[in-house]
Image (spheres, rainbow, N blue to C red):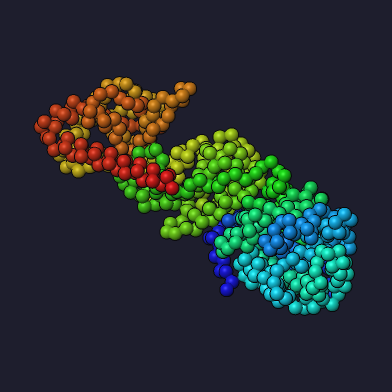
Amino acid sequence: MNALRIPAPSLRPSVMESFLAEIHQTHRGETGGALADYIPELTRADPACFGIALVTADGQPYAVGDSKIPFTIQSISKALVYGLALEDHGVEGVLAKVGVEPSGDAFNAIVFDERTNRPFNPMVNAGAIATTGLIQGHGAGERTGRIIEMFRRYTGRTLAVDEAVFASETATGHRNRAITWLMHNFGMVDARVDEHLEVYFRQCSLLVTAEDLAMMGATLANGGVNPVTGERALDARYVKFVTAAMASCGMYDFAGEWSFRVGIPAKSGVGGGILAVLPGQLGIGTFSPLLDAQGNSLRGIRCCEEFSRRFDLHIFDPIRPGAMSVARVYRGSQVRSKVMRRERERHLLEAHGGQIVVLELQGELQFSAAEQVLSHASRVVNAAPEACGHLILDLNRVVRISGAARDMLARLQCELAAQGIDLYVSGGGGHAAFMAAGGLPEACFYATLDAALEHCEAAVLARSLQADVESAGALPLTEMELLAGLGKEDLGRVAALLSPHSFAAGASIIRQGDEASSLFFLSRGRVAIRIPGAADTPIRLASVGPGVAFGEMALLDGGRRSADAVAETDCQVLSLEVGDLESLGRERPGIVTVITANIARVMSGRLRSANAELQALAR
C-alpha cells in the first residue's frame, strides 16, 4: 500500500513555494538543449515540461510547475541501486568490482581503469551495470522486485516500469551490451549478461516525478530514513558513500564544475531529472527533458545553481546547520508581558491572548533553519482553535543570520501582512540593522520580547474593548481592583482619604529603600516597577496599568520599599496613607478585610500566572 502523505498546514501561498515559483519563472523560458534521442522513446517527451520540488529532512514538501509529471528515472537510479549493492556486499565487496574515481569521460564511454579493469565509478553506465550485477536475487524478476521495493521505501509509493521505454532501451542498447560483455571478460560481472542488462534497463525505465526525486533526496538527507513514512530505505552506514559518489561523479563530465558552482551532491538522468541532496537539510528534485551536451537537464542545472547561490546551500559554505532553530513555541494566553493589568483585561487576554504567538529561535539561522521557522509559522497561522493575529520571532538566542534566512523572513512578513497578521522581531540586537536592510520594516523590531508582547497585548485589548485602553480617561474608584466589593458608603469613606497626584513621564514615585507608608492606586497612565541593574541600566520587573494598585506590601508588612516606581507615561495616581486606612479600619473593619482579601486574590492570580508561564516555557 502506498504511504499517505499529509503535509502540515501552510501559508497560502507557501512562502517557500513563492521562492520556488520565482526560480521556476526565471528559467522556464530557456529553450536551449535537446531531447535525448539515443533512446528513441525519450524523444516523445514534452520539451516545455519543467517542475521543481523540495522536501526538507523533516518531511516538509514544496513544489511548483510540472512536479507531478511522470518521466523515467534513467541514470538517477544508479545512485540508489549503488546503495542497495553496498547493503548486499559491503563497501569492500563493491569496491572490488566498481571504483569511485571521476572519469572525465561521457557517461556511456567504454573506458576502464587500466590498473584494475574496473569501471571508474558507479555513476557511468559501465559502473552502474556492474553495480546492478551485484544486486542479489534469483532471476531478473526477483532482482527487479527488490529494486522496486527499495524505491518504494525512498518515495513512499510503488513505482511502475514504463514498458515502452524499457522496450526501446532493450532494442537499442547495443553499446551497453558491448560494455557488459567486456566487463564479463574482465571478471567484473558474471555470465548472466542478458539478465543483468534486463534488470538495468528496467531500473532505468521506472517512472518517477520531481516530487519523488525530492523525497528520495530528503531520505538520504535524513540519514536513509524516509522523513514522512519513517521507514528506513538505506542502512545509515552507507548513506555517506552514496552521497560522496554523487558529489564526485553524479553529473558525468560536468561533475567538477557542478561541485564548483552548485556544491550539492546530485545525480542526473537523460530522462530530464536531477536529484540533489544536502545532507541533514533537504532533497531537491527537478524535471526538464531538454539536455545539455553532457546529458544533464539544462533548466535543472540553472535552477539548482540559483537555488544554491540564493540560499547559501553550497556544501563547502562555512555556514553549516546547527541545532533545531525553533526552541519553543507558545501563545500570549500562556506567557504575558510584565504589564500588571486589571481583572477585566486579564480575563480578555486569557480569552484572546492566543492570537499572539511567539517563536523562540536559537543558533545560526541559515536556509534549513529559516525553513523550519516558515514551517512553524504555517502551523500556528492556521492552528485551531484561535487564529494567529500577531507572530513574534524572538532572536535573543540567535548568534548569526545568513542573507538567505533574512530574505526568507522578509518574505514571511509580506505574506503574513497580506493575510492581516502582524510579524514582529524581538531581541534582534546587532541583527536588527542587517534584517532591516533586507526589507523588514522598522516597525517590526522591538528591543525585548517583553516590549513586543506588551505591544501585541495592547492591540488585542483594543480590539476586544473596542477602544484604546491606554487613551481612556481616568478610571473611577469602582474600577480599582483592590476596592472591588466595597459598598457605596465604604467606597466614599475611602475616597475621602485619597490624595490625588500627577506625575510627568520619568518622574519618581517610589524610591527603593524608602519607608513603606502609602498605598497607590493608578487611575491613568503607566508606572514601571524596577530595580537598579548593571552599568546603571534599570531592570523592569513589571509595569502597572490603570486600575491596578502598587506599593500594596506597605499594608501587609510595612518595612522599606524593595523597588523603584517610576512614571513611564504621564500619570494620575491616588495615594492612601496606611495609617489613615488603619484608623478607618477601627471604625469600619470590614473595609480593611475586603482590601486585604483583594490583595490576597491578586497575589494568588499572579502566582498562578507565573506557574503557567514556567510550565509553558519548560516544554
Quarter location, residue 29:
bottom right
Relative to 494, 324 lies left or right = right
Q: Is residue 145 above or below residue 443?
A: below
**Residue 478 percent location from the top left of the image:** 24, 41
Which residue corresponds to the image point at 63% horizontal and 58% vertical from the top-left?
235
Relative to 475, 305 lies left or right = right
Q: Nearer the viewer, residue 69 or 547?
A: 69
- Residue lying furthest left in this view? 587
Residue 438 seen in the figure: no
Relative to 266, 281 lies left or right = left
Which residue corresponds to the image point at 16% horizontal and 29% vertical from the top-left?
582
Residue 308 seen in the figure: yes
**Residue 321 percent location from the top left of the image:** 62, 45
Quarter location, residue 118:
bottom right
Q: Quadrant of the N terminus?
A: bottom right
**Residue 600 percent location from the top left of the image:** 24, 39
